[in-house]
Image: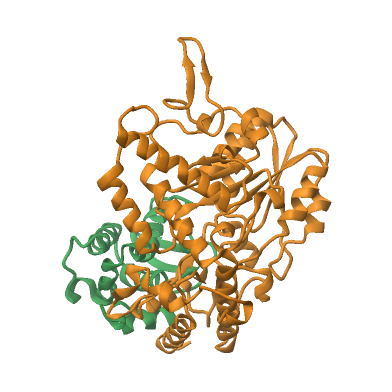
Chain colours: A green, B orange
Amino acid sequence: MALDELYKEVILDHYKNPRNKREMPGAVLQCSKNNPLCGDEITVFVNEDDGTIADVSFVGQGCSISQSSASMMTETVAGKSRDEVEASIGAFRGMMAGEVEADEDSFGELVALKGVVKYPVRVKCAVLAWDVLQDALAGEGEAEGSAPH
Amino acid sequence: MTEQRGPSTFDVERVKRDFPILSRTSHGKRLVYLDSANTSQKPRSVIDTITEYYERHNANLYRAVYELAEEATAMFEGARTKLATFIGAPDPDAVVFTRGTTESINLIANAWGRRFLREGDEILFSELEHHSNIVPWQLVAEATGAVTRMVPIEDDGTLDAERIEGMMTDRTKVLAISGQSNVLGTMPAIKRLAASAHAIGAIIVVDGAQLVPHNPVDVTGLNVDFLTISGHKMLGPTASGGLYGRLELLDAMAPFLGGGEMIMEVYPDHSTYKAPPHKFEAGTMNIAEEIGLASAIDYLEGLGMENVRDHERELTAYAIEALGSIGATVYGPKDPDVRGGAVSFWYKDIHPHDLAQVLDQEGVCVRPGHHCAQVLMRRLGVPATTRASFYVYNTPEDVDALIAALEKAGEFFGA
């Protein structure tokens, strides 16, 4: 696989110019997680309004895959209802497990992360932000990642 | 490159040809293997030894009376003698076979620590240590009421013997220390520290996972109490290795695993145990692996450990200079005389995982991550590093390939 198939331009763009990368003081829902394998850290902040995601942001550090995935995630879920967000999280996990044929119509920019599937070690990086979002929505505070070694 | 050091049989191009895997490609490029601190590649002679063992001699040890079993037993015990001689142990019985350093330290922490550590006793370890020289001690401290204390490294990544000695008290019972750091290459003054530990009645446990594969080692001269050995990092098979322990200590220790082959007599209410090393070798051992390790030692002795050290010293010096010249930050001591060939670095703010991925596409194998040394990573102030590490089959061209791949990564990420 050529490098630019894994590191699509979209990924590098979100890595270098992350969207919604900011603290959100007073956020109702907030959760932090890290992936001890590589030291990736993500904190996700969420404010809801009448059952939809009114505002979502993240801060963190890590590799281009984990950080670009977080950036794209915030754009994907903003303005969605909880059910829609759950569906997005499920669909993204499905793509990362290689179970869902990802196309641009349903995944938008996220389809750029499809190449990660071929690198099992990096899948953990890509799903980290989504795990944190799910835990934040479930009202969990801080959690530790479970990657081994 | 070692010509000026007298007659040497070390010819790296010839050495490379002894390692079949080095003739393959990776992503269509020449394979550049710079991850020997993780695990080493294996020469043809080791692979052949294992094959021959299974084709000609395979049987379980000690208990059978037929020819095959006698051959297997002789080969296995021969491997013990070979390993003992290789590390300067006075007696083969002082060498216990284990799966490697992790199992060895767990054995020492449990079989020695649980018997001899008391509440309030202190276990000293350094900030450099691999998790396998921290966690077993934390577990035994929890079980016995002993406490662990950490000796910090200096800003240049070295360990100051005086600082370690200054932290020793009359409650210090164990100094657990790496012989050579798997992240920074740092080589603490083991001989001096052994004497200091003994002066206050403590034992010294040396994690030899990186020391033994890359340096001449003499446990008698160093006067250490325990030294652990990972065979797979010294051209041997995975799950080969062992530990050296002073015989009086091995004698006094409790068994570790109970079961077959470690006993003398078993009754319903108690059992008696064999003398070391068999007291610590319950169940069927990694027979083929330890015999393979003996073959690896033959190979290393053929090269000469002084020559191995010299070769790596020159490569390490070359790599540190080359990395510096492209703006990479190298962690740890810069003087190759006081460090080994594990070179950790940070390059242009590209995350180590991204860096290693680009390097992989160029056929260059390095390790990104915390290297099982999270305590040290926190001190360095980084979540991870990229590490290149060298062994007998590496060449200056491998370093050049690393540098070229790094520059490519820099361009790719626009850093």
Q: Position of residue B312 (x, y in %)?
A: 56, 73
- Is residue B192 depicted above or below B338 in this figure? above
B51 or B111: nearer the eye? B51
Relative horizontal placement of residue A42, taking residue B248 as reference (left or right): left
Q: In which quarter of the image is the N terminus of chain B?
A: bottom right
Q: Which residue is drawn at 71% across and 71% down?
A: B156
- Is residue B95 depicted above or below B7 in this figure? above
Q: Which residue is drawn at 39% across and 59% down?
A: A133
Q: Which residue is drawn at 42% across and 55% down?
A: B295
Q: Which residue is drawn at 26% across and 57% down?
A: A83
Q: Where is residue B199 in the image (x, y as percent from the top left)?
A: 82, 43
Q: Is residue A14 visible?
A: yes
B311 or A73: nearer the eye? B311
How many numbered circles are shown? 0
B245 or B139: nearer the eye? B245
Relative horizontal placement of residue B253, taking residue B284 as reference (left or right): right
Q: Position of residue B33 (x, y in %)?
A: 41, 72
Relative horizontal placement of residue B154, taking residue B393 as reference (left or right): right
Q: Position of residue B174 (x, y in %)?
A: 71, 42
Q: Can residue A146 be seen in this view?
A: no
